[in-house]
Amino acid sequence: MADVDLRKLRYFVAVAEQLHFGRAAADLHIAQPVLSRQIRALEDELKAQLFVRDRRTTELTPAGRQLLADAGPLLASADALRRRVTRAARVPDSFTIGFMPGLIVTEAVRALAGCHPQLTVNVLRTSWDDQTAVLHDGRADVSYIRLPVDQSGLQIQALLAEPRVAVFPAGHRLAGKDTISIADLADEHLLQDPDAVPEWRDIASEMRTRARRSAPVFRTVEEKLEHVAAGHGIVLLPLSTAVFYTRPGVAHSHVSDIPPNQVCLAWDATRRSRLIQDFAAIAAGHPPVASPAEPGLGRI
């Protein structure tokens, strides 16, 4: 079997997402007959029909649905490969530092720029979903991450730990308490990925099932806090993140019996960059500053 042509795969994804050859061709800036020929050629190479077409509709076949599921990671990997090779080929003139919400990394950024005046130092705000992906795909050279994460292929350097807090709607029964326990949250609805709060799953098997079933689609702290304020549930956050996103309508309390959140510096373990080693040394002496806590925990 011939290797899959990535260009044809991109054409396929465009059609599969639109389910319309004309609109897909327009998005790709190619003629529709050319697109149709490319899709037929891909079907011939794969020896599988990918679409069922009539005059009104275009639908994916089971083989087409499978290819669409597999195409995304494959194309993303190809894009990441291209970025990494391009980065390796050029003389280092820029350096990108990722960081999670609630962390202030200014001192380390300034120190690197001071050591390498010719270097353009960029920063990139990350999230729970992409804090390690930016390292694997080359968008960032190093990144300040919050554990737990999949550490495969990464070099990790511990920097600091900070308390975690539960964030409630302002009128919640626990709002205003300085300290609570994880057991106090057993009947609450968790509005975040349970993998971000492994202690949550240890409360009870019933809680584990509910947390997994209700895994949210909210990707940013701002979205989560909007849903908390609306009374849809609660989230657990590092203290600095909760304080950084101070806003009306929510309150937070320290959770006394779960470990603190660990902040680390991470980078691709296969890279042998002098700049990365320099920054790792700087970060060890200039750990990120967590947003300062207000007196008491109370309202945010």
Image (spheres, rainbow, N blue to C red):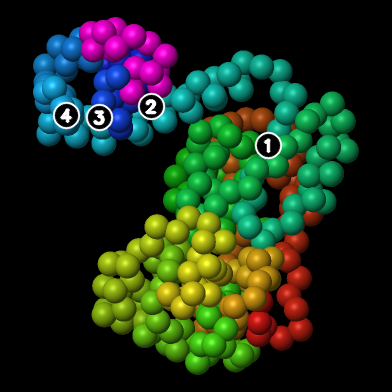
**Residue sitting nearer the eye, 27 or 60:** 27
Quadrant of residue 77 in the image? top left
Residue lying at 69% horizontally and 58% vertically, measured from the top left = 103
Q: Are marks 1 and 3 in contact (CB under 8 Å)?
A: no
Give the side of residue 53 with respect to residue 81, left or right: left
Amino acid type of the residue that numbered disc 4 sits on in the rendered structure = Thr
The residue that label 1 is drawn on is 96
Q: Crowding at label 4, few (<14), some or many (≥20) Cα neighbours within 10 Å?
A: few
Amino acid type of the residue that numbered disc 1 sits on in the rendered structure = Thr
Q: Are marks 4 and 1 in contact (CB under 8 Å)?
A: no
Q: CA distance from mark 1 to mark 2?
A: 23 Å
Mark closest to the chain's N terminus, 4 or 2: 4
Quadrant of residue 159 in the image? bottom right
Residue 84 marker: none
The residue that label 2 is drawn on is 75
163 in relation to 245, above or below:
below
The residue that label 4 is drawn on is 57
Q: Nearer the viewer, mark 4 or mark 1?
A: 4
Amino acid type of the residue that numbered disc 2 sits on in the rendered structure = Leu
Q: Can residue 106 be seen in the rendering of this structure? A: yes
Amino acid type of the residue that numbered disc 3 sits on in the rendered structure = Leu
Q: Nearer the viewer, mark 1 or mark 3?
A: 3
- Residue 78, position in %: x, y? 42, 24
Residue lying at 75% horizontally and 61% vertically, measured from the top left = 289
Mark closest to the chain's N terminus, 4 or 1: 4
Mark closest to the chain's N terminus, 1 or 3: 3
**Residue sitting nearer the eye, 123 or 55:** 55
Residue 19 marker: 3
Q: Which residues make up the magenta segment?
A: 23-37
196 in relation to 276, above or below:
below
